Image (cartoon, grey):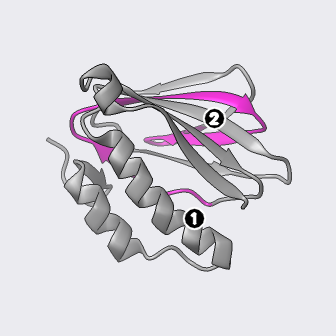
Amino acid sequence: MDFEVRVLVSSADTGGAQAVTEFTFERPFDGPPLHWHRSYAETFVCLEGVCTVRFEQHEEQLVPGDVAYIPPGVLHSYRIEGVHRTRYLLVCSPSGDFDQYVADAAAVAAESHRRNAPVDMELLRAIRGRYETYEADVPRF
């Protein structure tokens, strides 16, 4: 498999304080559309390879050891480029049910990635809405 998501620390483990997931990509991935979260922040920690994170109007390439913090309400996305394996941790705080959102969304994305087909964006949009994650066209606050 060339895409894997592992929940390392679940919302249940921390009483909702945070969730930690590890993402591994074995090939390029376009990532999700620009989106924002109503009630939680995300912190990306690059472990291996290169991950490009977009914040509002600028981009930042993360290499191993780099960290990027995204507060609630900030438009963002990411993508994986290049031919080398890329791994990063994503820490969400507070977590709510973010680990379940990640599991639901990753299952859809992994299936599309495996088939080398476009992601079903309407299905992902419905999943995001259940977890207070909204695309750029949804007004913030």
Question: Is 42 on the left or on the right of 97, as rendered?
Answer: right
User: What residue do we see at 78% from left, 38% from top?
Assistant: 49
Q: Secondary structure at mark 2?
A: strand
User: Between tags 2 and 1, which lies in front?
Assistant: 1
Q: Where does the C terminus fall, quadrant-wise?
A: top left
Q: Is residue 80 shown above or below 18? A: below
Magenta: main secondary structure equals strand
The quadrant where residue 22 appears: top right
Among the two numbered marks 2 and 1 on one chain, the one whose residue lies closer to the N terminus? 2
Give yes or no for contact between labels 2 and 1 (Cβ–Cβ under 8 Å). Answer: no
Q: Residue at x 67, y 41 (%)?
A: 51
Determine which residue is flagged by label 2: 88
Q: Is residue 129 something that shows in the picture?
A: yes
Q: Secondary structure at mark 1?
A: helix
The circle drawn on residue 10 is none
Which residue is at the front of the view, 8 or 18? 8
**Mark 2 surroundings within 10 Å by alpha-carbon count, few (fewer than 14), some (14 through 19), many (20 or more):** many
Closer-to-camera residue (90/41): 90
Q: Is residue 64 left or right of residue 77?
A: right
At which x and y percent is residue 46?
66, 29
| Residue matched to label 1 | 110
The image quarter containing residue 114 is bottom right
Give how far across and how far down residue 97 sits, in percent. Answer: 27, 41
CA gap between label 2 and label 1 equals 16 Å
Q: Is residue 31 magenta?
A: yes
Give the vertical position of 114 relative to 63 (above or below): below
Q: Amino acid at mark 1?
A: Ala
Magenta range is 30-59
Q: Taking the image as drawn, is residue 33 in sight?
A: no
- Quarter occupied by residue 68: top right
